[in-house]
Structure formats: C-alpha cells, structure tokens
C-alpha cells in the first residue's frame, strides 16, 4: 500500500518497464515531434516508436551505399551528379564514414534536441551501439575524438554534443575519449546547400589545430559528430590529424544528411 510520495516513486521504479511507460505516458503525456501521435516509451525520447521504426527500416533497407562516405548511391540522378560525387568523396582524408541513420524524422528531432540537452534516448544509444559494432574492422580504433566546437559556441551551449556521443561510445567500447588534442581555431559557417565545393574548402582552411600531436601520433582515430552533411568538415579535421601523424581516421555520426549532390 502506498503511504507517501517516496513510496509512490519506489513503487514506480519497481514496476515492469511496460507498465511504467504506460504510467509515465498517462502522467506526462507527450506528443511525437514528427507525427504528433502519443509517445509510449521513455526509451524513444521525442519521437514515437513508429517514427523510429521508419528511420531504422530506411537505414537497413536495400539502398546501396558508398563504402567510403556512406552516401546513398540510389540518388545519383545523372552521370554528372555521380561523377561530381565520386570526385568529392575521393578527396576526403578519412578512410570511411558511417552513421546510425538518415537525418530526418525521429533522427532529426533527436539530434536537434541534443544541441540543447546533453542526453541521448535509449533507442538512439542502441542504434549507436549497433553502428559501432558494424564498423569495418580493418583498422581497430584506438582513440575517440569528438568534433570540437568553436570556443564561443561551446560557451553559448554549455556542452559539446559530439562529446556526449563520444562519452557514450567510450562507455560501451572501453576506449578513451580524446577531447583535448585538437581545437577549432576558426569560426566556420554552417555549410549551406548552395555552397560550392571550393567555397566550402576555403571556409574550412586551417579551421583546426592539433595542439597535442603526441596524443594522435601513430593511432587509429574515430572522429565522432552528430551530423555529417557534405563530409567536408570531417574531411578537414581528418586531414589535420593525419598531418600530425595519426595512422588513419574514420568517422561515425548519429545522422547522415545529404546535400543536393547526395554527397
Ligand atoms: Zn511519430
Ligand atoms: Zn562516397
């Protein structure tokens, strides 16, 4: 019998997850930010299970992907688009990039929330675990490096969302997070869809500085971020790490967004 508020919470914590979810949904009704339906499990964060399922199905489906940059190859609508995409992809200094799913629907809403709250819902943590386990094992990862934020932006936000992801990966892999070896020394604009490759490259020139090369020398690094769009930022950081002696650099992001070239 429940006699106090503490007893009530004790009782809630001992309740099986499904009953607890039902209780939470009743007490704190929340609508899916994608479709507006009720969210039935706290594990799903800000989107409902059906919307997550859509993302998971899309990622696991039959679309062939570029083995290097993980762009969906089905979108290359012309020979010219395909050629431009290959040209950009070949220049990337990283060996390969992987993601947990496309940047839309449940994934997009969750990534947007992560910029305001340093928390990953359990469902996304599961996806991250699967994506990490599925990384090509040709190069065993030795160090996890979160994409650094420009200091001013870090101060505004109070935390680096890439570091939240990196910490999660460190917990499940036992690897260390290396968040001090490299810093962002240039405030870069978010890459707009219409920006040309040359313009993007120029805006990123000397954007990163490896201040502790001994922490990257001879190591295989996994670069971690929330979203990869063009791949140019990850490519530029990978280049800086390789110039400082890293053995190789791979990339893992929560989401993969496509620009108009699908790159
Ligand atoms: Zn939904
Ligand atoms: Zn590619």
Image (cartoon, rainbow, N blue to C red):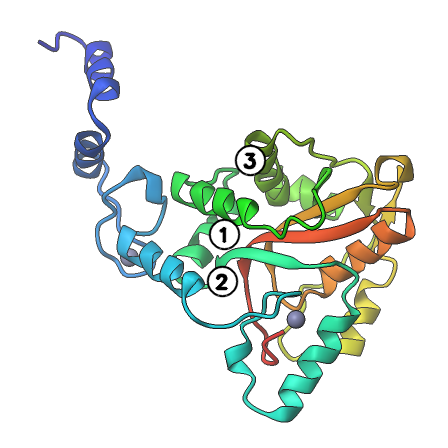
Choose the circle earlier in sequence order: 2 or 3: 2
Closer to the camera: disc 1 or disc 3? 3
Residues at marks 1 and 2 touching, judged by CB atoms closer than 8 Å: yes
Do the numbered discs 2 and 3 sit on residues whose CB atoms are within 8 Å? Answer: no
- Which residue corresponds to mark 1? 111
Looking at the image, the residue that sits furthest to the bottom is: 79
- Residue bearing mark 3: 168
Residue 148 visible in the picture: no
Which residue is identified by label 2?
103
Q: Nearer the viewer, residue 52 or 152?
A: 52
Query: Tag 3, which secondary structure?
Result: helix
Q: Is mark 1 within 8 Å of ligand 1?
A: no
The residue at the point 75 percent across, 48 percent down is 150
Q: In the rendered view, would you say 259 is above or below 182?
A: below
Q: Is mark 3 within 8 Å of ligand 1?
A: no
* Within-10-Å neighbours for mark 1: few <14, some 14–19, many 20+: many
Query: For the residues marked 1 and 2, what is the alpha-carbon distance in whole angstroms?
Result: 8 Å
Q: CA distance from mark 1 to mark 3?
A: 15 Å
Residue at x-position 79% and y-position 54%: 237
Mark nearer the viewer, 1 or 2: 2
């Amino acid at each position: 019998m429940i006699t106090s508020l503490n007893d009530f919470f004790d009782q809630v914590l001992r309740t099986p997850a499904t009953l607890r979810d039902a209780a939470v949904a009743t007490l704190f009704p929340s609508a899916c930010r994608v479709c507006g339906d009720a969210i039935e499990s706290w594990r799903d964060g800000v989107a409902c299970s059906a919307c997550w399922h859509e993302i998971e199905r899309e990622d696991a489906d039959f679309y062939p992907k570029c083995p290097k940059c993980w762009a969906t190859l089905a979108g290359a609508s012309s020979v010219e688009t395909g050629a431009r995409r290959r040209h950009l992809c070949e220049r990337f200094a990283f060996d390969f990039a992987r993601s947990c799913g496309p940047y839309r629907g449940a994934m997009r809403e969750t990534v947007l929330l992560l910029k305001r709250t340093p928390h990953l819902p359990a469902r996304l943590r599961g996806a991250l675990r699967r994506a990490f386990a599925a990384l090509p094992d040709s190069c065993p990862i030795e160090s996890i490096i979160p994409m650094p934020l420009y200091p001013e932006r870090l101060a505004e936000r109070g935390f680096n969302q890439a570091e939240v992801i990196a910490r999660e990966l460190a917990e499940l892999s036992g690897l260390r997070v290396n968040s001090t070896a490299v810093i962002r020394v240039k405030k870069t604009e978010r890459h707009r869809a219409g920006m040309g490759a040359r313009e993007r490259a120029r805006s990123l020139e000397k954007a990163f500085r490896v201040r502790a090369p001994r922490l990257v020398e001879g190591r295989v690094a996994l670069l971690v971020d929330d979203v990869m769009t063009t791949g140019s930022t990850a490519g530029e950081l990978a280049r800086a790490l390789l110039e400082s002696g890293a053995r190789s650099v791979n990339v893992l992001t929560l989401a993969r967004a496509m620009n108009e070239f699908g790159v």
